[in-house]
Image (cartoon, rainbow, N blue to C red):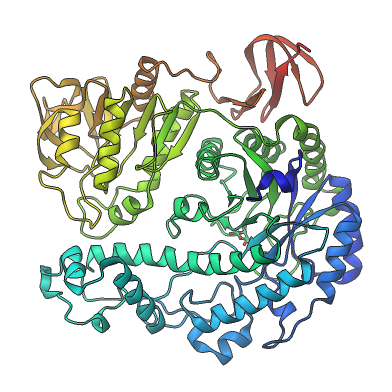
Amino acid sequence: MPSLRDAARGRILFGGDYNPEQWPEEVWEDDARLMKEAGVNSVTLGVFSWAKIEPRPGAREFGWLDRLMDLMHAHGIGVVLATPTASPPPWMGARHPETLPRSEDGSIVWYGSRQQFCASSPVYRRYAAALTEDLAARYADHPALTVWHINNEYCTHCWCDGTAAHFRRWLRGRYDTLDALNEAWGTAFWSQRYDAWTEILPPRTAQYMKNPAQVLDFRRFTSDALLECYTAERDIVARHTPQIPVTTNFMPLWSGQDAWAWSAQEDVVSVDIYPDPRDPLGGQYNAMIADMTRSQAAGPWMLMEQAAGPVNWRGVNHPKPEGLNRLWSLQAVARGADAVCYFQWRQSRQGSEKFHSGMLTHAGEQGRTFREIKRLGAELALLGPAVSGSGVAAEVAVLHDWDSWWAGEQEGRPSSLVDYTEIVRSWHRALWEGGFATEFARPEADLSQFKVVAVPHLYLLTDAAIDNLVAYVRGGGRLVCGFFSGVADVDDRIRPGGMDARLRALFGIRTLHEWWPLDAGAAVECDGFRGGLWSEELEAEPDTEVVAAYRDGELAGLPAVLRRGRAWYVSTLPGPEALRALLDGVAREAGAEPVLAGLPPGVEAVRRGELLFLLNHGRGTVAVNVPGDLADLLTGRAVRGTVELGRHGVAVLRSAAP
Ligand code: GAL
């Protein structure tokens, strides 16, 4: 199977989306010159060029792309070639309106922007396949081709009649009989029983709350329908070039695609990361997405897009202060990225993204952004041979699952304030601030390599997942589980007792009487900390250790955090310090160690292969104590005892011993 290693060849890929169709050809030579100057070795071509390649149905205009592929090759720059199927040209929607998605209320999502296609439309799929076929045939032997990039950020949703028919086929595959479907969807409730397959619809706008099991299946279906579009194009390009790896870029922690299922279908896992430069925890957000992507890739991954400066889609779009782009880029490398790329090479002068930064901004080659890009390019060239292809070891796993997310975030639940991604982020933050290297895993995965497994919040757990967790603890692992977990089964049916009996036995919970969600901003006092968002009225088994009890409110005196042997249950969301202390304690008991002890606040340490990365996310200069005789790969200087890091400073250390 081809991999990122084949494309990177001992380097870190550096570059970005290149949209030369927006520019006159005389600019292209200048682009190539400046790319060389910046150390760019990879560009992504073609992402939004469908209308340029196929200006009218069946036409093919490849000449311009031929010239670009040759130009890039002449400059030693590899091409990540995209199938341009994310944005069909207007002629598609005008001639084939059935390719346009429909919203939940039946209204049409028109062309004039991008990504206006229905994943279930046979017409869209036919045109996409034909174009992919010709693109792959034409460039299969081109020496510049390094990676195939299928589509872009698959994210469309559609509720049209064609989707309805496709949904029914998918449901037949899952349930076989209508009786099984009625049972799984609990259609005895509110007189929703289906008498014929043709009656079943995607969950469209309705009078009141929709059937949650139907919504859950529709989310599963939508992810699968988009995945079919991906695999159809992937199979075409792979037939032409079995040696070239294939990817499609994910949005980070995006609910529309089950990235566990998707990444299994990719040779290279890639992601687009856009933290807010003003977010004081932006570094933690990056670390979380990097850990997640590396886990999905089971190894090195590709940072396909990030912004060199401001984006244009927040309310207020802040630039990156000097050094921040470098810090976050090197952080991605530390956490396993073998590619550091951007949206986009040259900032657009027209269109919706003309205020979105590029590597080369409106300020041009004299601009600060480009100057910083050049520095980063040179440093990545230095780092490549030392780091490319190597791994990041972790002793702690965080469990994450799309089914649970989809089932948990619906109408009609105890608290609409519970935000799945925020809870995952809180738990990852606690581990990140504690200095532990973490991986993400799905609940059914083999967990035996981890000393600690953290479950921030998994509302839905399958029987297999529950058995897996129980076996993990029996096998010697330590499990820490957050509130409102193990509540529903695979069909979003509440487990008897409100939490699966195997889990209650594992944690030593005799009875779960009630869930007591908290109001926005409210807190509940517990022994030694304050909890937020949620609390639970639990009755423990006599041999269960109550680690902390609730101190005020209706639940005063009842267990808040409890433990039975190697299994902990946390029935609220402790504040950041408390969650950190709790996870720290469990990790230490398990023999898991932070990457480097005694770090000043805001400094992150990551080991990748032989290298120790130190990254300063804090505001000021800090001195970090380091063990042994080391050398900083970036400066070539010897480091003994301490290393000083300025604001946004980074050191990449390796043993000075020969
Ligand atoms: C990504 C997308 C790019 C560009 C970028 C802007 O979601 O793939 O094409 O729009 O956002 O931040």
- Decide: is 572 above or below 343: above
Kindly tell me whether residue 306 is visible in this rendering: no
Please name the residue shown 52% across and 35% down the image. Answer: 284
Q: Quadrant of residue 211?
A: bottom left
Q: Quadrant of residue 89?
A: bottom right
Count of numbered circles in the view: 0
Please name the residue shown 82% across and 37% down the image. Answer: 378
In-front residue for pair 258/160? 258
192 sits left or right of 212 in the view: left
- Give percent across and percent down for residue 328: 64, 38
- Give percent across and percent down for residue 148: 68, 60
Name the image quarter holding the C terminus: top right
- Decide: is 218 above or below 593: below
Q: Quadrant of ligand 1?
A: bottom right
Please name the residue shown 25% across and 80% down the image. Answer: 197
- Decide: is 450 above or below 87: above
In-front residue for pair 428/10? 10
- Decide: is 88 above or below 214: below
In-front residue for pair 516/395? 395
580 sits left or right of 292 in the view: left
- Give percent across and percent down for residue 373: 78, 44
- Give percent across and percent down for residue 120: 46, 76
Kindly tell me whether residue 502 is visible in this rendering: yes
511 sits left or right of 247 in the view: left
312 sits left or right of 516 in the view: right
In-front residue for pair 476/374? 476
Q: Quadrant of residue 136?
A: bottom right
